[in-house]
Image (tube, rainbow, N blue to C red):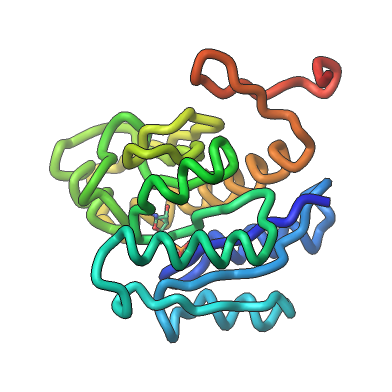
Amino acid sequence: MKNIVVLVSGGGTNLQALIDSQDRGDIKGGRIICVISSKDGAFALERAKKADIPTVVIPRKDYPDSKAYSEAILAELNRQQADLVVLAGFMTILDECVTKAYPYKIINVHPALIPSFCGEGFYGLKVHEKALEYGVKVSGATVHFVNEKADAGAIILQGAVNVENDDTPEILQRRIMENVEWKLLPKAVSLFCEDRIEIKDGRAYVLDVRDKK
Ligand code: GAR
């Protein structure tokens, strides 16, 4: 069983999707052993507690910079003996001390079709505001591995939705969450735990069960 540690900052609907998926028995080969929040009082912590998952709060505001914060996160991940780290609405970019210690072992969900509307400054509702401002007709979400560049790691799964004329950022966000994020994040976590993601030349490929070595 792989030890899954989930990092959150806010409402935690993606964490809830992972918990629900785990409860249905859909995450084979792994279990969520801990939820770490960058914010005290994040509603995601309530979701974890309700599911009897241990929580740790490491407040971003208590650290002077990203490096010091990332070192604290790294120490906790090591203490938890994490096999997989899932960023589920985690709003802090982690320093390379973490990404180098967990290569191809950190998965993030980003609410756009990477390489559009991603990178530093693109997070949460801002992503949807920018997509609507640009006038794109489809948007979606991307589940990808995390490396030392923001939103630039190997893509595992992507899914798209249509953008409607009268969409607001909130409406588009909700459509993307419901139709893509809450489905693809648990799916990618399950694929990882079943060793069904292969890395070749820096790209990620999902293996068919038959192809698994
Ligand atoms: C989700 O849409 C997630 O994709 C996004 O923030 C929201 C968090 O919602 N993450 C990012 O923008 C990270 N760059 P949640 O707390 O309800 O899961």
Q: Nearer the viewer, residue 38 or 67?
A: 67
Q: Residue at x 51, y 68 (%)?
A: 12
Instruction: Please state the horizontal and vertical placement of residue 187, each as a whole percent of the image.
Output: 67, 42
Answer whether residue 166 is visible to the viewer in this image: no
Q: Residue at x 56, y 53 (%)?
A: 86
Q: Looking at this rendering, what residue extends furthest in the bottom direction?
A: 41
Q: Is residue 201 above or below residue 138?
A: above
Instruction: Please state the horizontal and vertical placement of residue 207, each as a whole percent of the image.
Output: 72, 21
Q: Quadrant of residue 89?
A: bottom left
Answer whether residue 157 is visible to the viewer in this image: yes
Direction from residue 128 to residue 108 in the image, left or right: right
Q: Nearer the viewer, residue 121 or 136?
A: 121
Q: Nearer the viewer, residue 114 or 154?
A: 154
Instruction: Please state the horizontal and vertical placement of residue 197, each as a whole percent of the image.
Output: 67, 28
How many numbered marks appear?
Answer: 0
Q: Residue at x 49, y 37 (%)?
A: 144
Tell me the quadrant of the picture where the C terminus can be found: top right
